[in-house]
Amino acid sequence: MKKIFLLLALIALFFGCKNEQAQTKSNSILTTTSILGDIIRNMVPEEIEVINLMGPGTDPHLYKASPSDYVHIREAQFIVLSGLHLEGKMAEVILGLDGEKKVKELTSSMTTEQIINSDGFADGHDPHVWMDVEIVRWCVLKLKTDLIKWFPEHRKAINERSEAYILKLGRLNREVLSILNEVPAERRIIVTSHDALNYFARAYQYEVRSLQGFSTAAEFGLKDVTALVDFIIDRKVPAIFVENIVSDQALKAVQAACQERGFEVALGGSLFTDALGNENTKANTYEGMIRANAITISHALKN
Amino acid sequence: MDAVFIILTGTLVAWLCGILGVFIVLRKLSMLGDAISHAVLPGIVIAYLISGDRSSPLLFMGAALFGVAVTVLIEFLNKKAAMQSDASVGTSFTLFFSIGIILVSLLASRVDIDADCVLHGEIGLVPFDRIVTNGIDFGPRQLWIIGVSFIVVTIVLIWAYKGLYLTSFNSEFAASLGVGIAGWHYLLMSSVSLATVVSFEAVGAILVVGFLVIPPASAWLWSRRLNEMIVLTLIMGLVSSVCGYYLAVLLDSSIAATMCVVALIQFVISFLINPRHGVLKRWIYKAHLSPHKPI
């Protein structure tokens, strides 16, 4: 036993000697999801680097950090999280660093009326807020003040870029509304795989049904499938939608089950919910992703 | 400094799981770690329903309680119902896990709750979560928790060594000597379940399940005595942690998974070249004894 402790002490000494002092980067912001990264990118000037932990197409529920991600967290001086438990345990730890670093959650400025509480528990907040452009606009407006506090030397640029982005989001919201309003009221039903569209449903007056609960990791039951199939047939839903981060197998099974009972439901296309699309797609920005979703939905449900 | 803390935590988890794992592997209960990782789900869900808060310490306590409960059930099925040990492990944990899933789907289906996001930690985050009181930094919280658990478990095992030794190898003989088998067994099983739940919170499931089985299994291939097996397990745990970390940095891959892979590489090497059951040795031996030559 003694030998082992001695060995351990030796190892500790060995590593302790090359004590690399981590340099914090004062001119960059660390963000988590690709959607959040794009929003922040639009608020700050080119000189401030925006680093994303999760790339496009990465499911935040299933994200696993690699050693270089931890180096990023260690080096970051300014961190913006999405919040409302989207980042899980990592958020708890990063929020604990507040003080040593500057940490802010995009959603922290939301009011209780804005937040959708899904299960009646104090902690059961729905984190998928970015599906409502109006809420993102509000959060950007609030976050601007914090970013200016963090980077006083870029005050003017941040102010200009954020204001321009806020205007852009306002235009986007009107555009999306007009696209989505092309669908007649009785056909405004979106069936998808996981529960990411509650904010969308509230903002654009759609009804949303999903196979899984909130987490993409949860399992769905037989009853969920049957209930969903009944719902689709009962309401004559023209199309159902897959998501870019979830396998389309389950929804194909739902489609087949509808077919068996003599009802043709189309696969309406892929929606971008928890992550941006890849580099060379139109959905590689937050704006593009929201627009792509609106077009996909309207196209599939309109006629 | 981050690297030191990660490696130190990894090593201590390997040792904590390893010294218990030796007895677990000898008792043919290797999948106990995996079983516990699933069986804690109802504890987490019930604790969440009571507290309504995902970061509440109640969740950890609920998990620990069900971790111990499943080991009691396994032992009961094994001894009282005379079931095979692997069958009792399989039956018990699927029972608990399915109760957990039913609870999730009935009561908390609209919230993101499972062991992965509320209990399981991540070894890379260990250096960030520190104990700071009055401005003095005492180092990573999980390192302290694992360190203290390791010391406690070591003391318990030294105290219980003789009893566990006898009951692990020859329980009938132990019984004839008047050694209470069940008592030692419950002591070991509850230590395992507390140690694994604590380790889950620090480093996540894969590393705990891996370190509970792989180093002891590799060490078993080399050793003739229990103390040899324990020492070899500790050495292999240390190597897995150190090499695993640097390999993970090199490949930029998940630290926990890479540490497990290094442990598995050691197992494969042990499997091939160990002096007792080495496969390589047998092949060479066979080649020399070709069927045409009379012996």
Image (tube, coloured by chain):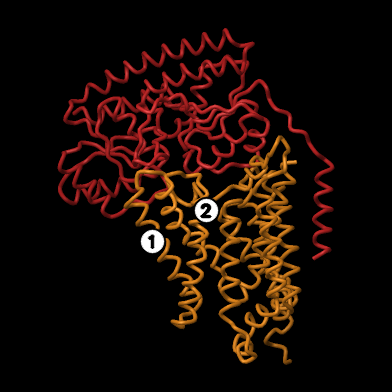
Chain colours: A red, B orange
Position of residue B272 measured from the top left corner of the image (x, y, whole percent): 69, 70
Label 2 belongs to which residue? B60
Q: Amino acid at mark 1?
A: Ser
Give the answer, above or below, for where A226 lies relative to B19: above
Q: Amino acid at mark 2?
A: Phe
Give the answer, above or below, for where A132 lies relative to B96: above
Label 1 belongs to which residue? B98
Q: Residue at x 57, y 14 (%)?
A: A148
Q: Secondary structure at mark 2?
A: helix
Q: Is residue B99 left or right of residue A156?
A: left
Q: Residue at x 36, y 17 (%)?
A: A172
Image quarter in which the C terminus of chain A is found: top left
Position of residue A34 measured from the top left corner of the image (x, y, whole percent): 50, 30
Which numbered disc covers residue B190? none
Q: Could you tell which of marks 1 and 2 lies nearer the N-terminus?
A: 2
Give the answer, above or below, for where B9 lies relative to A279: below
Crowding at mark 2 (Cα within 10 Å: few <14, some 14-19, many 20+)? many
Q: Is residue A295 left or right of residue B236?
A: left
Crowding at mark 1 (Cα within 10 Å: few <14, some 14-19, many 20+)? some
3D distance between C-alphas at marks 1 and 2: 19 Å
Of circles 1 and 2, the one toward us is 2
Q: Are marks 1 and 2 on the same chain?
A: yes
Q: Is residue B250 visible?
A: no
Q: Is residue B172 visible?
A: yes
Question: Which residue is farthest front?
Answer: B134
Q: Nearer the viewer, residue A42 or B169?
A: B169
